Image (spheres, coloured by chain):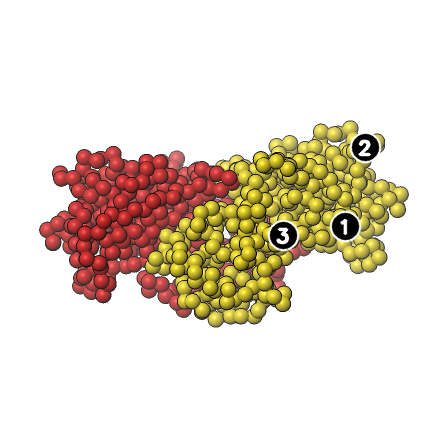
Chain colours: A red, B yellow
Amino acid sequence: MNKANLFYAQSGGVTSVINASACGVIETARKHKDKIGTVYAGRNGIVGALKEELINTNKESARSIAALRSTPAGAFGSCRYKLKSYAEHKQEYERLMDVFYAHNIKYFLYNGGGDSQDTANKLSKLSIDKGFPIKCIGIPKTVDNDLPKTDNCPGFGSVAKYVAVSIREAGLDVASMSESSTKVFVLEVMGRHAGWIAGASGLASEHEGDAPHIILFPEIAFNKKNFLAKVRTSVKKFGYCAIVVSEGAQYRDGRFLAETGGKDAFGHSQLGGVAPFVANMIKESLGYKYHWAVADYLQRSARHVAAATDVEQAYAVGKAAVEFALKGKNAVMPIIIRGKGQRYTWSIGEAKLSDVANIEKKMPRNYISKDGFHITERAKKYFSPLIKGEDYPPYKNGLPRYARLKNILTKKKLEPWKQT
Amino acid sequence: MNKANLFYAQSGGVTSVINASACGVIETARKHKDKIGTVYAGRNGIVGALKEELINTNKESARSIAALRSTPAGAFGSCRYKLKSYAEHKQEYERLMDVFYAHNIKYFLYNGGGDSQDTANKLSKLSIDKGFPIKCIGIPKTVDNDLPKTDNCPGFGSVAKYVAVSIREAGLDVASMSESSTKVFVLEVMGRHAGWIAGASGLASEHEGDAPHIILFPEIAFNKKNFLAKVRTSVKKFGYCAIVVSEGAQYRDGRFLAETGGKDAFGHSQLGGVAPFVANMIKESLGYKYHWAVADYLQRSARHVAAATDVEQAYAVGKAAVEFALKGKNAVMPIIIRGKGQRYTWSIGEAKLSDVANIEKKMPRNYISKDGFHITERAKKYFSPLIKGEDYPPYKNGLPRYARLKNILTKKKLEPWKQT
């Protein structure tokens, strides 16, 4: 096998552990210098490849690369940029091929969700047709936990831990105040189409009366009457009501409870603000004093409270992706397989990119309680190991010390890219 | 000195370390069983005294009390209930005296902000007049950090750490995405009248270009033109702009930004929340894609990321309050005094309740940069030691294990209280 270079890019919304995957990729590649030359990282994801903005990770010290393991967000930049089909956007694919050819890149590792795995899959096919075959390996990443085949997605466990910890803490706060003040607290969490994140908050509820008392899932059509009845019951019984609502909570007809009307680069509706909407609905109907919070980016960047299991798995899929490439595998993605025993164990398996591209995995109905407002024991059994373990970043002067990379671009060899 | 009982109550908005003060009170009292009989805690604060709902803390194990040190919110319940003047609400003060007399309570420790210290001060005077003198000691607590005399308030350091950590993490997230997606992020934090919390977020900014780029303080009249210019400059220069806005941010005429009756991004009338208001203002004027978060109760209950300094000081003021009472002091409050040296040191001093009651300490103008959008080096020097050190709670199954008290009420001796 000739020595070739490797291109790694981060794609879509970042997570608190996507850099741990980058760390796994780079550290593993550095152990195979006989086969892998330089690891280039795309500046701002795949856009970096199109613009020939290739970060030379050889310029980063071993210490900086190691620090990626405990650094949230995308250290090389990410992007929301989806390549269309080859038929529609032939030029973009050709450009990628040109850049990879010019820089002798024969490994393409794409760290993202379903959209990204679709891109990697298409590129793999094209590269074979073009006679410059590139090993295209996906690396799973998404806080939404909605990729098929894998038991869970790196990035999810840490958000899950964040929301469960946060609602437990805020729940205690509201419980303290509810006699004379706030009786209802609403926390909005991410999850556009699937309620995995909202569902994981249910782990905080261990004894009767514990927060959260109500979870609103995208999978369950919102019923105002039932919801308000449940809020009232909770306040009567426990003195307060703590609610976790998924940003994707929706009515039976598919309208989101709070829609902005805007669309993002992938054509998805841009959401936000369902917490104040729900809180206000309660105030108007039941008169309870409320508070609400919207966690937004705080939840997916909260490396300070990441789950150790998640960090380990994020690293492992990065490492496995390099090992897959070195074994000559192509158009596959390492996945996480859960062991069968009572005690949680996991191992790395593989899935074809064609089997994971553009497929969304929703919460199974039997993970959601009959009344649609909480999770079942089955769901708890699934979620619980994913948030386990603490993996604190190093601190200096009271603040987490996160990696600061030099991000030096390699010299361009091609004409500037002209986006059409 | 005859053996007497001690009454402790939590007051107003709770914090992530007010229970550490409770822990300091109870553990210290238990060491002086010759002088202090039972420590009663008010169920839901002072309301518990009025209703004669006295929690017998003797029923809690040493282990449970120790666990309070790492448990957020108010373990005995708190309340928003301010006693008016004796002239206006004579009956309430008389009732407190009756309850304290019936239960042989000669020590009253009130853990709260300025309002609470005012109540404690009034009760102290009354008890002397009534011939049943009660030692009334205040214990400082407020996330707002607005009590006078003390260098800082227990509860503040941990919120400060939370907001600085959060904006650092979210800032990295936005930086990753800004090339093709979100360019502006707005985090709303507490602080209705004083910008201490918002200001502390400035600690996250260590190098040029670090988040937060803009801080909006209640102390600085909001100027839309200057603000938008600053946002634009930040986006042009660093690619993105991370903003921390105090809930108390206001116009020159004192109107809150959040109270201006605007419409939010999705056309609903504003439901509260200065973050979406500011984010939308930017979108309309500059067109940048935004995200926003409202931390609300998450920030003040976030024991998982508490500052060790804050936990120690919260415990110390609880301990000192008992020691003050045993020394025969009255109508005083332990305060935190900062050492003069370069290295941060602190000790416990005392202030008269009459000097701290109902006085709000605002951020000094020289803590805020000239342009009004950030903090100065002087402010950083003040804030920095307060967020230092990590004091993680114990975890079980991936979640913090917080104290669960029995909260057993002692037998009532009086007729039910009739609120007038």
Look at discs 1 and 3 and give the one toward the viewer. Answer: 3
Image spot of residue B198 (x, y percent) = 55, 53
Residue where numbered disc 2 is placed? B3
How many neighbours does mark 1 have within 10 angstroms: few (below 14), some (14-19), or many (20 or more)?
many
Which residue is situated farthest in the front direction here?
B370
Name the N-terminal-most of marks 3 and 2: 2
**Distance from the alpha carbon under mark 1 to that under mark 3:** 27 Å
Q: CA distance from mark 3 to mark 2?
A: 45 Å
Q: Chain of mark 2?
A: B
Look at the picture and state if A48 lies above or below B221.
Answer: above
Q: Residues at marks 3 and 2, common chain?
A: yes
Is residue B304 left or right of A412 when viewed as pictured?
Answer: right
Seen from the viewer's position, the closer of residues A47 and A118 is: A47
Say yes or no: labels 1 and 3 on the same chain: yes
Q: As rendered, which of A215 and A302 lies closer to the eye?
A: A302
Q: What residue did someone put label 1 on?
A: B119
Q: Which residue is mark 3?
A: B364
Residue A241 shows in this picture: no
- What chain is tagged by disc 3? B
Give me the residue at 54% from left, 51% from top.
B375
Q: Earlier in the sequence, mark 1 or mark 3?
A: 1
* Of B44 and A273, the residue lying toward us: A273
**The residue positioned farthest toward the left in the image shown:** A131
